[in-house]
Image (cartoon, helix red, strand yellow):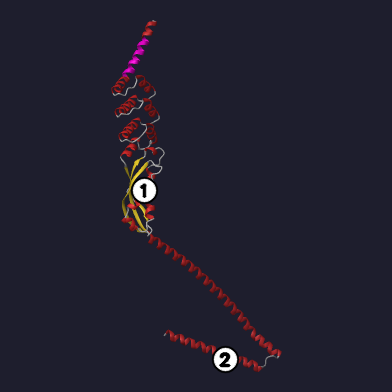
Amino acid sequence: MTDFIIIGIIALVAIIIFLVLAKFIGIWIRARVSNAPVGLLNLVAMWIRKVPPALIVDSRITAAKAGLDFSTDQLEAHYLAGGHVDDVVLSMIAADKAAIPLAFDRACAIDLAVKGTTKTVLEAVRTSINPAVIDCPGGGKKIDAVARDGIQLRARARVTVRTNLDRFVGGATEETIVARVNEGIVTSIGSAQSHKDVLENPDHISHRVLERGLDANTQFEILSIDIADVDVGENIGATLQASQAEADKQVAQAKAEVRRAAAVATEQEMSARTQEMRAKLVESEAQVPMAIAEAFRSGNLGVMDYTNYRNIVADTDMRQSIATEVSDDEEDEADS
């Protein structure tokens, strides 16, 4: 009975070994004939670590055929870190063929850096080999800037860049390049004495922008900046002057209104004072008869004196009446 158990165990182990060999024998043979050998135990260990052996072996074969040698441990480590092994291998091959220095660790770091984005390490290497063109500001829009003469210019630029692999990890992205180029164009146009200078020599803008070193601390190296289109916009200077003139006019009107209100207040005050003085005059005139009566009683005023006083008053009233009639006649003649 014991012999049957031992034989059964041996048979079971043999079946397991056969199944394992059957599972990995094809991959093992493919690696051997491709001069990228991988041991069977390594393949089994990959399977146990939940690393796809076919992916690692195929990537190693691809690298070996291109003259590169990567160990299975390197490829496994990058896969377990969440990277794309096939993209890293292809990017290393592309960099090697283009004579671009790129270490395996750097390629892995770039691959992990672009994880979760639409970019890949292979695209980064390809952009380093074949420069890309970025439209500024992008989306078919144009950059608005105003020259010193007040004329608005609308420009559109095309920036040729290539990836700087040494600064790719931790470097600023394409959006930073676009923002810096837009700022440089606005500054260059704003420093121009006349919009005609910009229209005659748009390449001056490119030179000034390039001199600013806009690719510092970014993932890219700017090769050239070309002004694709420049259009003349509105006369912003004239618009601002018109707005300023309107504002000055409103300020002047407000000040004039203040002065008018002050004049009206002064006039009202003078009218009140005039009425007050007239009231005092009427009060004083009312005291004249009483003073005359008192003078009669005290003997200081005689009948002849009073008669002369009345004659003087009557003469004065007559003169005022004549003067008023003459003034009215002159006004009528002037109107006619």
Quadrant location of the C terminus in the rendered image:
bottom left
- Ranked by sequence position, the earlier of labels 2 and 1 is 1
- Label count reads 2
Residue 210's disc number: 1
Residue receiving disc 2: 315
Closest to the camera, between mark 2 and mark 1, is 1
Residue 290 rendering spot, x and y as whole percentages: 66, 85
Q: Which residues are magenta?
A: 8-22
Q: Could you tell whether 310 is left or right of 71 in the image?
A: right
- Please, is residue 179 above or below residue 260 in the view? above
Circle 1 sits in a helix, a strand or a loop, which is it? Answer: helix
* Circles 2 and 1 in contact, beta carbons < 8 Å: no
Quadrant location of the N terminus in the rendered image:
top left
Q: Please, what is the three-letter code of the amino acid marked with disc 2?
A: Asp
Residue 291 rendering spot, x and y as whole percentages: 67, 86
Query: Residue at horizontal 39%, vertical 6%?
Result: 2
Residue 150's disc number: none
